Structure formats: C-alpha cells, structure tokens
Amino acid sequence: MQKVYETAAEAVFDIEDGVTLMSGGFGLCGNPENLIRALADKGVKDLTVISNNCGTDEYGLGLLLQNRQIRKMVSSYVGENKNFEGQFLSGELEVELNPQGTLAERIRAGGAGIPAFYTPTGYGTVVADGKETREFDGRHYVMERALTADFAIVKAYKGDTQGNLIFRATARNFNPLMAMAGRITIAEVEELVEPGELDPDEIHLSGVYVQRILKGTDYEKWIEQRTTRTKESK
C-alpha cells in the first residue's frame, strides 16, 4: 500500500463538506499545521471537529474557524480564541464541551473499539444531563460514548513510509489516540525515513493505524501566551 503523499493538498483530496474530523494537538503544540492549511485552502465547510482546543485567532484550527468552515466543535478547552467566543455566542458554532480526561478517554475508547464507558467525572453536573448514570460500589458514574471520526489529521516528529510514528515530548498528546480513532488517518511528520530506519522500541504508533503520510514543511514555533519579566524581578 502506497502511503506517501507529496503534498498536504493531495493528502486531503477526499475530505469533503460535512465530515467529522479529529485534529491532534494540545494548545499550539503538535498541531498538523500543513494539513490544517490545506483544508483552509480547500475551503471545505460544515465540519464537525474533535480537538482538545481550537487554536488561537490566527494559528492552528483557528484558521478554519476564521473561514467559518467549522459547524461544531467537540473540545475540552476553548479559552484562547475570540473568534470561537463570537461564533458561539452568535449561534453560528455548536459546541460540545468535555472534561479533558473524558475527552481523551472517549477518543481512546473509539480507537479501541469500545462503544461506551462509565466515569465519575461530571456526575451531578450539567455534563451528565441526558446521559445514563449508574452506581457501582456506592459511587455514581456517567456513561460516555466513544468518539470516532471520518478522518484524523495528526502531527509526529518522525515517521517512516509505512506510517510508523514517533512523537516528541508534549506533541505526544492527543495525536496517537486520534490516529487510532480515525477511519482514515493522515499524518504529517518533520522527518520521513525508509522502513527499518526507526528503532522499533521508540515507535509510539504502529503504521497499521496510518493510511497516509507526508513530510511537512515550514513549521513555526508558536507561543500562545508570552510571559516575560524584568531582570530586577528575578
């Protein structure tokens, strides 16, 4: 199976309006930047996007939000994007907020073929509204459904042409989970090597979960909030 694509535009050729899309990253770390830009250029709309957050006004998934390409966000943190706030308050954007651990487990469960699970997180709050609850050993739990997606776009540090991936530091956040939960997973990597060049003990995700891979370019080291202090305050 030929998995390597030369450009991000070629790799997202069949992502159409209305699909459900998982996008890896935590804040602005580990975002599949090339693939997000390709989707922005493609102009697909009415997307349901599952991601920890929605980037900032000008970076990450914020590019798709600027273009009003996203219909619904399934997230756990949305506090860095004014466009997000404005579209939500105006009714343009549907939002499903999840506790962060619950979101991660819903995605992991989807990739593992587990349809639902019980968690104590959110019991007795609006998070539990409309959901099944049960008591186990004297403690109350909320049933959460697993999440899957038509496509998952992820970013890794290094990969081989068979799709085996290595993530670096914080970029190993939602990316591996989402790669497992997407029907078609597209990975961009900073370094693309031939099979056998990766140490098997260092591989974080098997290539069986990755259908397409490309070498990304023009990566930026984004900073969400820059905090500085004067020399005297040290």
Image (cartoon, helix red, strand yellow):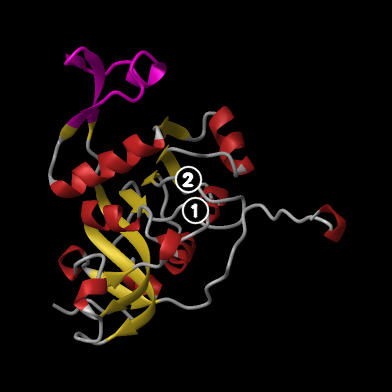
Q: Residue at x 23, y 51 (%)?
A: 181
Q: Nearer the viewer, residue 41 or 37?
A: 37
Question: What residue did someone put label 2 on?
Answer: 53
Q: Position of residue 110 (x, y in %)?
A: 20, 44
Q: Nearest the camera: 147 or 117? A: 117
Which residue is depicted at the point 52% across and 39% down? 78
- Left or right of residue 188: residue 199: left
Q: Is residue 228 magenta?
A: no
Q: Is residue 104 left or right of residue 143?
A: right
Few, some or many C-alpha atoms within 10 Å of disc 2 (few <14, some 14-19, many ≥20)? Answer: many
Q: Secondary structure at mark 2?
A: loop
Q: Is residue 81 visible?
A: yes
Quarter location, residue 183: bottom left
What amino acid is found at the position of numbered circle 2 in the picture?
A: Asn
Q: Which residues are magenta?
A: 117-144
The residue at the point 40 percent across, 44 percent down is 46
Q: Which label number is shown at residue 61?
A: 1
Between marks 2 and 1 in the image, the one whose residue lies nearer the viewer: 2
Is residue 164 visible in the rendered image? The answer is: no
Q: Is residue 30 above or below residue 122?
A: below
Do callouts 2 and 1 mark residues in contact (Cβ within 8 Å)? yes
Q: Residue furthest right?
A: 232
